[in-house]
Image (cartoon, rainbow, N blue to C red):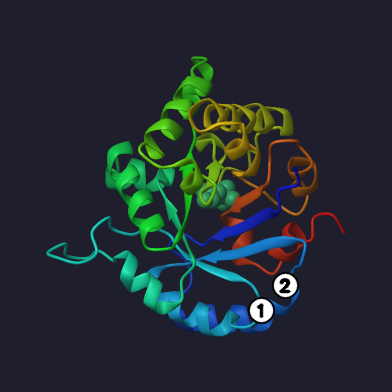
Amino acid sequence: MMRKKIVAGNWKMNKTPKETAAFLSGAKDKMVSDAVDVVFCVPFVDLQVAVDALAGTGIGVGAENMHFEDAGAFTGEVSAPMLKEMGVEYVVLGHSERREYFGETDEMINKKVKKALASDLKPILCCGETLEQREAGITIEWVRMQIKCGLLGLTAEEVQKVVLAYEPIWAIGTGKTATSEQAQEVCKAVREVVAEVYGDATADVVRVQYGGSVSGANAAELFAMADIDGGLVGGASLKEDFADIIHYNK
Ligand code: 13P
């Protein structure tokens, strides 16, 4: 089974709309790929600029979060229909920064995953352990539970549309990448839990990214691992060097 790799940038809280337009108009030609699905996940206020700048390139645009209701009294929130109308294709859900700083629980994240799929948005569902959890030897157990809870109640067909992203928290923004063996071990465990709950056919199709200090220097080794189908990239996606990750096998 050949899964197409997917390399997604997660800009987090970086770049204004003007900076987005300037960066993407200058860099987009280098970011185009037939071999890899390329996605830029950007702040809400940059989404329309990104959708317009990337039109016709085949590069997708994603949001970094969304609410699980379509509309209502949720001050400050953004809904799936709003994203969809703008031409957004993906949405990052359950990033560790949302869990840690904004109190997102597995239950909320599961509702968001369901809403995204019902709205024809492709969720990028994140999981990952803290350093303390890794040192305590509970990484696999923890990540299995995050995946089970995040995907709870979905059909196998729906799970196939989800992108799963394993991001060890200790490797995010630290320059400390998981070794390719460490990343492979957990990405394999993620695929195994999908197989247990949704069957082998679904586990074969679902894409599992690694995230955490991915760079042009380590992407080729990470993406060569059997269960790693690309990367979710923070810091390096803000620069033109992101192209080195997209074209990791050149
Ligand atoms: P860095 O690539 O900056 O470590 O960030 C990873 C990440 O959190 C992507 O979602």
Disc 2 target residue: 32
Element marked by disc 1:
loop
Q: Position of residue 176 (x, y in %)?
A: 63, 38
Give the residue drawn at x 56%, y 55%: 234
Position of 153 relative to 189 (above/below): below
Q: Earlier in the sequence, mark 1 or mark 2?
A: 2
Give the residue drawn at x 53%, y 44%: 164
Residue at the limit of the structure toward the left, as seen here: 73
Q: Between residue 222 and residue 14, name the one nearer to us.
A: 222
Q: Amino acid at mark 1?
A: Thr
Q: Amino acid at mark 2?
A: Val
Disc 1 target residue: 57
Crowd tier of the residue under label 2, counting other residues whose Cα lies within 10 Å: few below 14, some 14–19, many 20 or above? some
Q: Name which quarter of the figure residue 235 lies in.
A: bottom right
Give the residue drawn at x 32%, y 73%: 82
Judged left or right of residue 120, residue 105 is left
Q: Position of residue 20 (x, y in %)?
A: 52, 78
Judged left or right of residue 191, residue 245 is right
Judged left or right of residue 191, residue 41 is left
Q: Position of residue 238 (x, y in %)?
A: 59, 65
The answer, for residue 76, to whether it is visible in the render is: yes
Give the residue drawn at x 69%, y 36%: 227
The reply to whether the C-beta atoms of the residues labelled 1 and 2 are less than 8 Å apart is yes
Position of 104 relative to 116 (above/below): above
Task: Say which quadrant the N terminus sits in.
Answer: top right
Whole-number angstrom distance, CA of label 1 to CA of label 2: 6 Å
Crowd tier of the residue under label 1, counting other residues whose Cα lies within 10 Å: few below 14, some 14–19, many 20 or above? few
